Amino acid sequence: MSARGEIVRLAGPTVIARGLAQAGLNEVVWVGEERLLSEVIRIEGDLATVQVYEETAGLALGEPVEAAGEPLAAELGPGLLGRIFDGVLRPLAALAEKQGDFVGRGVRLPSLDRAVRYDFHPEVREGDEIAPGTRIGVALDPDGVQHPVLAPPATGGRAVQVRAGPAAVDDPVIRLDGGATVALAHRWPVRRPRPFRRRLASDVPFLTGQRVLDCFFPVVAGGTAMIPGGFGTGKTVLEQSLAKYADADVVVYVGCGERGNEMAEVIDEFPRLEDPRTGRPLMERTVMVVNTSNMPVAAREASMYTGITIAEYFRDMGLAVALMIDSTSRWAEALREISARLEEMPGEEGYPTYLASRLARFYERAGRVETLGGAEGAVTVVGAVSPPGGDLSEPVTQCSLRATGALSALSADLAHRRHYPAIDWGVSFSLDAGRLAAWFEREAGQGFGGLREEAMRLLQREREILEVAELVGTESLQDAERLVLESARLLREGFLRQSAYDPADASCPPAKAFEMLRLFLEFHGRAASAVGQGVPLRSVLDAGVGPKLLRLTQVTPDEMPRAGEVLRAEMGEALARLEAE
Ligand SMILES: Nc1ncnc2c1ncn2[C@@H]1O[C@H](COP(=O)(O)OP(=O)(O)O)[C@@H](O)[C@H]1O
Ligand SMILES: [Mg+2]
């Protein structure tokens, strides 16, 4: 049966065990008398190296080690939404009740609560052929919320018994002719991507509600983006804004290894956030996987995989899922620590040489797909990176760059000037922008692509002029150049800047963003032509259009078309008057 062995060496969060030769790589093993959750990470002859997901202090040589017979797996089923788990999917709230505030060792709590009775409404009948991924029914929880139930990826056959009515997550509700059963929940190994029929091309955006992202650095639904930024540049606030406002049916938030107090804030705040779309608690469509830096590194390393496995589970129901990770650097550091314990040959800055391939394989699990059941689902992944000192040349940033489709680099300089989100438009890019051009023309407004380029050129001109001004002084600038500086300033402060704490502006739909951008650039165009005709810049600026542009953030999306027309007319009149003088 399952292999049993004993501990022969202890090395921090890893132990070496003898007698586990039957166990496979990545198999779960229970370590010690307390049966600590662990995973085999190397096998050499009769010796297995095992990483322990729990605090290892107090383990002794000779204690037993037993293989569980399966790889590290997540339990997927109704009851995930709205919950907070640790990196190996143990429910944190339940653990806290059982253990006080700290997650105790050897506590084995199932991810999903066995005590909850769901009301199962089958949608298949006895005799029906059930293929992997088929929707077999819905489970109603005690609050009446419906949870779709799908046959797991590897399970299929003819239904010989179908049971409606009350069921716990692990009760079999369907028996197949081969003898296999389907329950409301199933397990899936976290390191193995869940299968789908085929990948679908994506030409629709993952809308974020952040103007600078949606307009300048948009990501496709099912795409990947990375957000590198030094300490305090706004990674966590941005990831949370995305969790709140991005266009997703389900959000999986992986809080990975950031300091305990920061994570505590997130855990404290998140459940109180309101879903702007429904007014209901945001947690109802959120699953949180959290590991603070004081939790064992191995669990931190696992948490990204746990998170994406949950995301794929909801994708397979035909949903749009957003996976937020804050931060992938802490995951990479966990990987580095484990690699060092294994005495592997270190690569750059001590990270293992397979850092790049691990990250690439991870981000490959994002995508828009046709599911096994024939639905369309997507997982979009946004990974924060915390490069030490904000230095983008470090390995985790560089490896992520190669693995993702978009970069939104946060700048300490912008954050210092309290320009939030501190996305550096000079450095950031999106490989998806071209593919999304048609969508934005159609849905946000015709001419969108042109406006985007014009805005970028204006910001670029600002940089160039400022560089010159630094050398020769601002006195030497022409009015036309000063106007560029003024228009760019307005664009930065009234368009790119967007406070996460301003209820009127925390999220901006693309049509409003389009109209705003059009007005900013129309102002610049009209003003440039007035200045070209000899109107002094001072008079142009005194016409009072600037402050009105800056107030557009406060206009509701519904009022925007009308407000735009009014401002456009005022702007035209004021500048025409100046030109006539
Ligand atoms: N979009 C934003 N709008 C308003 N303030 C922000 C925004 N992003 C960041 N901030 C400010 O910057 C601080 C640090 O942001 P945080 O996300 O915690 O940084 P990081 O996670 O990169 O260390 C926040 O507490 C907040 O005051
Ligand atoms: Mg943070």
Image (cartoon, helix red, strand yellow):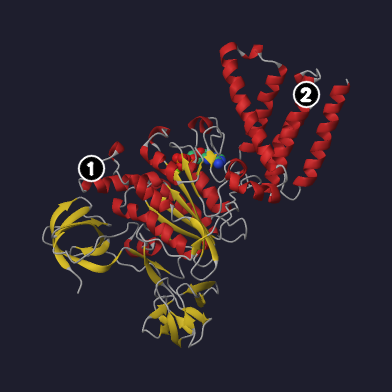
Instruction: Name above or below for residue 369 compared with residue 165.
Output: above
Q: Secondary structure at mark 2?
A: helix
Which image quadrant for residue 476?
A: top right
Above or below 47: residue 479: above
Specify whether residue 183 is in view. Answer: yes
Using residue 23 as the reference point, say whether residue 439 is left or right of it.
Answer: right
Residue at mark 2:
540
- Give neighbour class at mark 1: few <14, some 14-19, many 20+ (Cα, 10 Å): few
| Residue drawn 77% across the image and 41% down it | 564
Who's the residue at 51% across and 49% down the image? Answer: 240
Dot 2 amino acid type: Val
Q: CA distance from mark 2 to mark 1?
A: 65 Å
Q: Quadrant of the N terminus?
A: bottom left
Q: Is residue 338 left or right of residue 486?
A: left
Q: Is residue 58 visible?
A: no
The amino acid type found where label 1 is placed reads: Met
- Disc number placed over residue 345 in the picture, else none: 1
Query: Regarding mark 1 in the picture, which secondary structure is present there?
Result: loop
Residue 124 spot, x, y in % from top left:
52, 83
